[in-house]
Image (cartoon, rainbow, N blue to C red):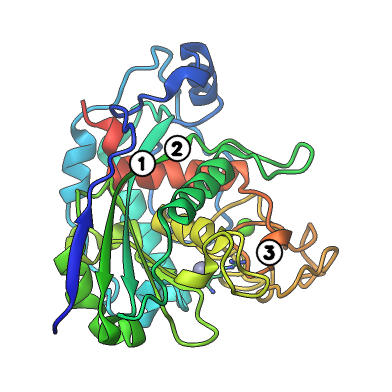
Amino acid sequence: MGNRTTTVREVIGRSPRGGSAATWSGLAVCALALTGLVANALPVPTDPGPVRAGAAAEPDPYCSPGSDAADTAARAAHTRVADPGADAAEGVEVTPEQAAEYEDQLREALVPLRGHELAPPYTVPVVVHVISAEDGRGDVSDRRIQEQVDVLDQAYRGEYALGSEGTDTGFRFELADVTRNADDAWFRDFNRYRDTIRSRLRQGGPETLNIYTTELESGLLGYSTFPQDYPDKPSQDGVVIAHDTLPGGERDRFNEGHTGTHEVGHWLGLFHTFQNGCRSPGDYVDDTPYEREAAAGCPKGRDSCPDLPGEDPVTNFMNYSDDACMTHFTQGQTRRMIEHWVAFRGGDARV
Ligand code: ARG
Ligand code: ZN
Ligand code: CA
């Protein structure tokens, strides 16, 4: 293959798990938990009605840390929905059946965690793998990599939100390592070589976010695996983004880093806001209104499911709007990401 792979170790003050908890007082964590952020082992819905709001079980008043049940759950019987190499599992298009299967796997993984506290913050170590051309195209600078991680951190803290819509998801992101890989074939044809590339380069366990930057075919900004894919294909776990979508990139309208924000949403278990269109259960999140199809540009005020409540969530990170249009995740999405974290990625829940 003739690629030159150099690993640049630049461990930037990675704190121990949950180490950046400074802004979260114990009280806040407990209060958050008491509002319903407790692992609920809901029975697998047989009728696909809308997912219930805060279908909360009894909150644990002691705010106990999790247990190694998360560990067990992460290894529990997950049957794969699709090959991670298949487009469906890479965030391109998830069929209603695949979405339902992912949901079943989530609910099943949460069963042994019932009653365990979901206690953010969760600090996610990030490893960025730069795939570039041998002439230097796509060799994004350390500064832009750090800016991308900063965008992630701020987006998941709710700092792009306008007014009261925003939610601090409790996820924090810290750059742990950068690898630089100059290889014309890999850069030009990433998707063809991606299984090899990812299994050669991937670092860490399910809690480590591996981001690959590369050239992607025109129109493709990025894609991701889902947490449920991890047990069967750990080496393929991660997010792929076009190098020109990083902050300061050349990609028109998509160069503020929110392709990263969006793909990491998939990596933490979120579907698109337009998943299942106007049909229940939509995106399996009850505070994102239904939406018939992806938004483009920034069509604020659009209402593509007029018979259902709410205008389209066009400013949500899990839509397809322009970066400048995207501002937030909702509480429901926050809950869903935390459920996936505890069920499949588990960092902080392992004691
Ligand atoms: N189309 C891509 C996906 O489905 C990414 C969309 C990102 N949107 C953005 N404004 N950056 O995962
Ligand atoms: Zn997507
Ligand atoms: Ca919804």
Q: Which residue is mark 1?
A: 124
Q: Distance between the Cα atoms at labels 2 and 1?
A: 6 Å
Q: Residue 309 appears in which quarter of the rendering?
A: bottom right
**Could you say which is closer to the camera, residue 53 or residue 245?**
245
Residue reaching furthest front?
135
- Going from the N terminus, do you reach mark 2 or mark 1 first? 1
Query: Which type of secondary structure does the marked residue at label 1 adopt?
Result: strand
Residue that numbered label 3 is attached to:
290
Please name the residue shown 21% across and 47% down the image: 74
Confirm if mark 1 falls within 8 A of ligand 1: no
Estimate how packed mark 2 is, as few (under 14), some (14 to 19) or many (20 or more) residues with alpha carbons within 10 Å: many
Res 268 visible: yes
| Residue depth check, mark 2 versus mark 3: number of the one nearer the observer | 2
Q: Which residue is the site of mark 2?
A: 172
Q: Residues within 10 Å of mark 3 (few under 14, many from 20)?
A: many
Three-letter code for the amino acid on which mark 2 is drawn: Arg
What amino acid type is highlighted by mark number 3? Tyr
Near-viewer residue (54 or 153) = 153
Q: Secondary structure at mark 2?
A: strand
Residue type pointed to by label 1: Val
Residue 49 placement: quadrant = bottom right
Ligand 3 - quadrant of the structure image: bottom right
